[in-house]
Amino acid sequence: MSDPFAKTRACFHLPEGVIYLDGNSLGPLPKAAAERVRGCVEREWGEMLITAWNRAGWMDLPRRLGDRIGRLIGAEAGSVVLGDTLSIKVYQALASALEMRPERRVILSDSGNFPSDLYMADGLIRTLARGHELRVVAPEAVEAAIGPETAVVMLTEVDYRTGRRHDMARLTARAHRAGALAIWDLAHSAGAIEVDLAGARADFAVGCTYKYLNSGPGGPAFIYVAPRLADRVRPALSGWLGHEAPFAFDPDYRPGAGIERMRVGTPPILQMAALEAALDIWDMVEMPAVRARSVELTQAFIAGVEAACPDLALASPRDPAERGSQVSFRHPEGYAIMQALIADGVIGDFRAPDILRFGFTPLYTSLADVEGAVAALRRVMAERLWDRPEFRRRARVT
Amino acid sequence: MSDPFAKTRACFHLPEGVIYLDGNSLGPLPKAAAERVRGCVEREWGEMLITAWNRAGWMDLPRRLGDRIGRLIGAEAGSVVLGDTLSIKVYQALASALEMRPERRVILSDSGNFPSDLYMADGLIRTLARGHELRVVAPEAVEAAIGPETAVVMLTEVDYRTGRRHDMARLTARAHRAGALAIWDLAHSAGAIEVDLAGARADFAVGCTYKYLNSGPGGPAFIYVAPRLADRVRPALSGWLGHEAPFAFDPDYRPGAGIERMRVGTPPILQMAALEAALDIWDMVEMPAVRARSVELTQAFIAGVEAACPDLALASPRDPAERGSQVSFRHPEGYAIMQALIADGVIGDFRAPDILRFGFTPLYTSLADVEGAVAALRRVMAERLWDRPEFRRRARVT
């Protein structure tokens, strides 16, 4: 049987001898991105200089690429824009949402959220100094915790540690029934699972592009604002490129139309060039097929590891409908095990205190990769390869 | 006499037939940046994948490059960090400063400040909702306007339109005597003039790298916090990379040591690679020599234009001590004049309503460029070349 993803796999540079299961942290290099970045540097920056902002279309990249990402997350046209980092986008969304619920004081989140989202909420709360509270409950307790005092439900759809997935439509509807707004962090969703922001009636969403979307290290984040809200949002981070007329150099801020107002400063063009090339690969596939393949890969990995490595405990939901596109196992020596595995050419990552994390990315991960990874993990565990000093020594982990 | 800057000029790719006087908006491509970015994409991202965060030193780039920029602006070692955009850095500095003066309500700025700085202040004031006021006075009225109610004096040292330069040491001292803090935007200072942040006892400074520092389109911004304050600052934008231990994934935010806490999210590595190569050129020169050459170039340009183009009115201070490294002229047809000039191969830019702006960047601008630019401008004015429909039609201007 031919591999339907052989064509997309051929679009990536995958180093010899490596099985890469960390595309949920940093996607690999799309071959065309190398060429596209070179062209951006040499032909656009080098030859056009300042005129490239118009002539090479740089100024519109945040919107143009936003629409292309929008297609992957079920967003309406013109509702997504690129820029900044995910943490900044969280702050923007949260500040806007709180201002739309001035009489409420609770930001509801869960203990599975990525810490930076919680930190940004904390920073905003202290800045507001109006008695807001960040209420962090267990993931399964979120629904019951939504109440009349909830201003915003702020959740990462797919847990960065375990891959556990929230029911976006259900929790958004619950938030709306309680009069609250919903912000979804799609860091581990965009390009990983089918997302339907419009269908779920999400209010805000944010995400990053360097994981499943393969934009490269430090690629820009994105933000979605539901079209029904976009023209009512007051941006807390009111930068000049979100102004109605940035080049009028008006001393007074007037927000741009709709999602444009969520732009802040000068966009990172070299990173956007890489993203643009990466998105071309996404144009070759449809998310339902990607998702089906992801389930096939993750199911095979779980079955293989459970058969081969009885000491590893599955940390991800067993039902694929309840998880994203990663699989995590727990082991008290998780750090050393991952180091030994990486030394053997299988790259996943470790998340404190005890999580071995493996990302499955159908655009370039094959069933043969799954088999190879299982075999390597079996060796590491059976031969206790992890119990060597060089693997137990902690370096800084990313 | 040999040109002392011939060596640095040879480090840049300068398109054939172009005299580039817009390096104050977007610096040209350092030849080594093209190679460095390619290496970052192909050898680091492509081959090392996620492990490059440690193995290629990506994680430390914001600090390492911060120190290299610090040398150019008189900052203490370990007091500058890269990241985000200038607008975001303005917000960070301003939010921190206001929190250090909780009993005061006035942010003092001037009408020569870059609009985005004023917009960000406006956005912060609305977010704080505690009755802060952004008081914008004429540049020459700033000193007298500093008073007991002033929390922060927030100024761009060199005016983006006219090149008029504030006296940083004097105004900072005046702010401190009044019990206020001083934030300096160095967008048109870093790499343009000698800056002595430590000597002036500036509290905060921010700046961008894609102008005089030549990091490329959308290169990251930087922020400086005086070492005496850095450990007392509470970051409003409390992202995970500003955490004391980002990879502990602690649910609670604890700010990192000193300037580290001003980091927010994942840094844009491709842009930083370009910046790194650009800063190598800065290592070949000392700022006093750059400044002396800048004065020589701008004086020659002013003399040449005033002799050749009587209809253009100098908008920059005549005394070089009172201006940065740009020269501006006013003309009601400024837009069309600049278009005609660009068509003739001399690239400057236009700033509404009537400013023709020319940046002088000794690393690659020669006296021959000055002569060529004067000759072109003379032609455009004497032959009324600007009075053609194709030059009068307004495109979006950057």
Image: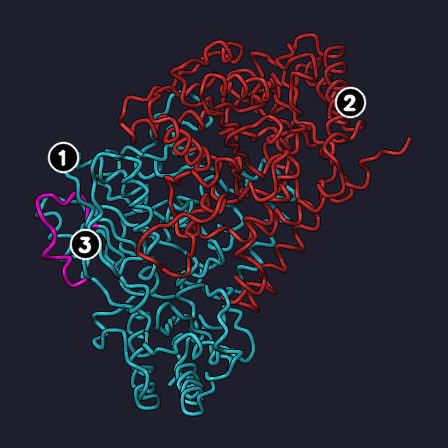
Chain colours: A red, B cyan
- Residue occupying the point 60% across, 45% down: B44
Q: Amino acid at mark 2?
A: Glu
Residue B245 x %, y %: 41, 27
Residue A138 x %, y %: 49, 11
Mark 3: give few (<14), some (14-19) or many (20+) Cα within 10 Å.
few
State whether residue B291 is above or below residue A208.
Answer: below
Q: Which residue does the numbered mark 3 point to in the structure image? A: B199
Q: Which residue does the numbered mark 2 point to in the structure image? A: A296
Residue A82 x %, y %: 53, 44
Left or right: A386 as drawn, with respect to A261: right
Q: Quadrant of the N terminus of chain A?
A: top right
Q: Amino acid at mark 1?
A: Glu
Q: CA distance from mark 1 to mark 2?
A: 61 Å
State whether residue B387 is above or below residue A160.
Answer: below
In the picture, the disc for residue B103 is: 1
Mark 1: give few (<14), some (14-19) or many (20+) Cα within 10 Å.
few
**Residue B72 forms part of the magenta stretch:** no
**Residue furthest out toward the right:** A1
Left or right: A92 as drawn, with respect to A170: left
Q: CA distance from mark 1 to mark 3?
A: 28 Å
Of all chains, the one bearing label 1 is: B
Q: Nearer the viewer, residue A272 or A360?
A: A272
The reply to whether the C-beta atoms of the residues labelled 2 and 3 are less than 8 Å apart is no
Mark 2: give few (<14), some (14-19) or many (20+) Cα within 10 Å.
some
Q: Amino acid at mark 3?
A: Gly
Magenta-colored span:
B139-153
Discs 2 and 3 lie in a common subunit: no
Q: Secondary structure at mark 2?
A: helix
